[in-house]
Image (spheres, grey):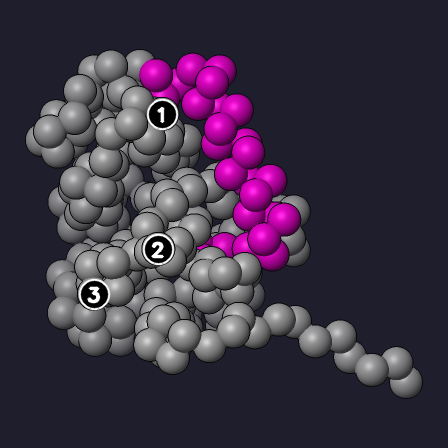
Amino acid sequence: MSRRIDYYFSFQSPWAYIGHQSLRRLVETYALELSYKPVLLGELFSETGGLPLAKRHPARQLYRAVELQRWRDKRGLDFKLWPKHWPFDARLADGVVIAALADGLDPEPYLQRAYAAVWERELDLTQKAVLTELANAAGLPGERLVAQAGSDQIRAAYEQNRLDAIAANVFGSPAYVLDGEVFWGQDRIELLEDALKSGREPYRPVDRAPI
């Protein structure tokens, strides 16, 4: 039986984009089942104590820009640090993934195009026409999926992903959950692969002993 990874992400997240091809390599190498779980980051941050970028201390914002450049080189990517249409409301773009899953379709070709659309091509993923074109190019019924992405059913599934994230102790994007063990950030992919290679039991949080 193949092992499953719950993949929490949003197209808002540069780190999800940076790590996606490495994640796909793991999926193919280890014949993993990937459970796509788009999640609204703003609400997840507020629930778990995180801060949106604009509210972080300037030192943290500056360090983030340096890290993006490091990982751009490390992963062999070519993307903009500050894309023209970022930040943006990712509900509709994320919702297309959920709509595809609800129709029994593989969203992966759309994910690859949508990540590149934000971070490389600087397209506006709040626009229905842009999302429709991306989905069509991925071999999906773009017009139908974009229409479904704004439905009550898809909004409910999006909210359920947020609840699932909180229940799984996920607090950011990307997060990869293997057997209940959370690997947060694309820079943990190597640790995720170590866990897959070894077949070890998942690590669990350890409560600090009372003083």
| Res 56 visible | yes
For marks 1 and 3 on the same chain, the one whose residue lies earlier in the sequence: 3
The reply to whether callout 1 and callout 3 are in contact (CB within 8 Å) is no
Q: Which residue is drawn at 14% across and 69% down?
A: 76
Front of the two marks 2 and 1: 2
Q: Which of marks 2 and 1 is nearer the N terminus?
A: 2
Check the image and report above or below for 26 versus 86. Answer: below
Name the residue carrying label 2.
1
Q: Characterize the local packing of mark 1: few (<14), some (14-19) or many (20 or more) Cα atoms within 10 angstroms.
A: some
Secondary structure of residue under mark 1:
helix
Relative vertical location of residue 86 with respect to residue 154 in this rendering, above or below: below
Residue with the most extreme right position: 211
Q: Quadrant of the N terminus?
A: bottom left
Q: In this view, does 208 lie above or below 34?
A: below
On the image, which quarter does residue 199 sit in? Answer: bottom left
Task: State the CA–CA distance, disc 3 to disc 2.
Answer: 15 Å
Residue under label 1: 102
The part of the chain drawn in magenta is 148-175
User: Which residue position is annotated with label 3?
Assistant: 29
